[in-house]
Image: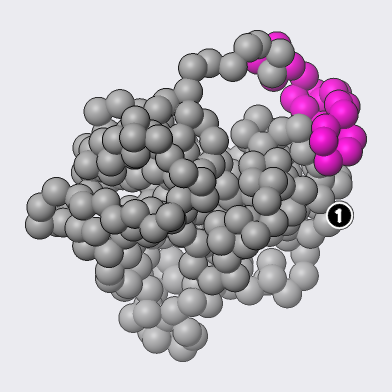
């Protein structure tokens, strides 16, 4: 969600300020699995229209809701629950309308989302799905259609078809989890030696680095099954603590207190790096500096 997106940007971009997630180059959408994503404005259709079925009840519901919402709002913005009541549906139902690529939202986390409609996407559903699959391969590859389908929240047949259409652009590789695919254009980058890692990073809940749907992918990041259960919980996930590129624990924050659950004994230098990273988080409204509390 938006504040988590801010921390994800901070983990990757130097000089990130508290208002970075509000930049005009970014938009919010109900994306894969109808969760809130902050994405590049130019990629709106990739995270919405790409998941729209060609036929069926979901397609009919999405098209109908989008048309009715557009007419009801008349170019205005409204809280999603109020808009839902105006249309005679629960506000959460408007997530289906987002599949058309015609709905944008703004959600700050503490308040309920505001919704409005935008112009229809200029690309087709098929084009959007293929490009979303390319993005997934670029970030999570080597991978396969099953993993893509689970992450994107699309049917298995849609995922398999997307990989078949992309076959000329792919190479098959051997991965720890079995045969998988990689974008051919990414092969050179995959063969390069790794770049130096940061001393410490605090990735928020739902960060792209940990947002992996398949258990075998998660095992590559966190080999210990018990620790995987602490990071990928059945409910709200904690954040991940990275030290020198390795996930070494989890973290949660309540106001100014950031609590770290370490999975191993950290050296003094490692702890100092984590504290420095915590103190640098661009969090608005904390009322003072972040204080790190250690468990383990």
- Which element carries disc 1, helix, strand or loop? helix
Give the image location of residue 247, x and y in percent.
Answer: 53, 42
The answer to which of 152 and 129 lies nearer the viewer is 152
- Residue range (magenta): 167-189
Q: Nearer the viewer, residue 150 or 262?
A: 262
Q: Position of residue 267 (x, y in %)?
A: 40, 35
Q: Is residue 171 magenta?
A: yes
Residue 259 visible? The answer is yes
Tag 1 residue:
157
Q: Residue at x 48, y 23 (%)?
A: 197
Going by the image, does 183 lie left or right of 293? right
Q: Residue at x 24, y 59 (%)?
A: 257
Residue 161 figure quarter:
top right
Task: Indicate whether residue 272 is drawn in magenta.
Answer: no
Residue 82, percent across and down? 33, 81
Q: Quadrant of residue 113?
A: bottom left
């Amino acid at each position: 969600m938006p504040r988590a997106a801010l921390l994800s940007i901070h983990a990757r971009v130097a000089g990130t300020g508290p208002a970075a997630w509000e930049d005009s180059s970014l938009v919010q959408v109900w994306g894969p699995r109808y969760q809130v994503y902050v994405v590049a404005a130019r990629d709106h259709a990739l995270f919405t229209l790409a998941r729209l079925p060609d036929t069926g009840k979901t397609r009919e519901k999405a098209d109908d809701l989008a048309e009715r919402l557009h007419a009801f709002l008349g170019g205005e913005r409204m809280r999603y629950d109020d808009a839902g009541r105006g249309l005679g549906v629960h506000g959460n139902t408007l997530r289906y309308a987002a599949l058309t690529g015609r709905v944008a939202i703004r959600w700050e986390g503490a308040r309920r989302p505001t919704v409005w409609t935008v112009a229809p996407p200029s690309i087709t559903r098929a084009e959007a799905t293929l490009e979303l699959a390319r993005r997934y391969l670029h970030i999570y590859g080597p991978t396969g259609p099953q993993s893509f389908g689970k992450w994107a929240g699309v049917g298995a047949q849609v995922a398999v078809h997307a990989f078949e259409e992309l076959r000329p652009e792919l190479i098959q590789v051997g991965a720890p989890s079995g045969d998988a695919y990689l974008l051919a254009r990414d092969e050179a980058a995959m063969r390069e030696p790794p770049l130096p890692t940061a001393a410490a990073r605090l990735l928020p809940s739902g960060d792209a680095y940990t947002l992996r749907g398949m258990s075998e992918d998660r095992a590559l990041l966190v080999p210990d099954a018990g620790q995987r259960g602490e990071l990928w919980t059945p409910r709200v996930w904690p954040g991940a603590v990275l030290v020198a590129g390795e996930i070494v624990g989890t973290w949660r924050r309540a106001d100014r207190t950031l609590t770290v659950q370490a999975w191993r004994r950290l050296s003094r230098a490692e702890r100092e790096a984590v504290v420095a990273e915590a103190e640098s988080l661009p969090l608005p409204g904390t009322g003072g500096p972040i204080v790190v509390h250690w468990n383990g």
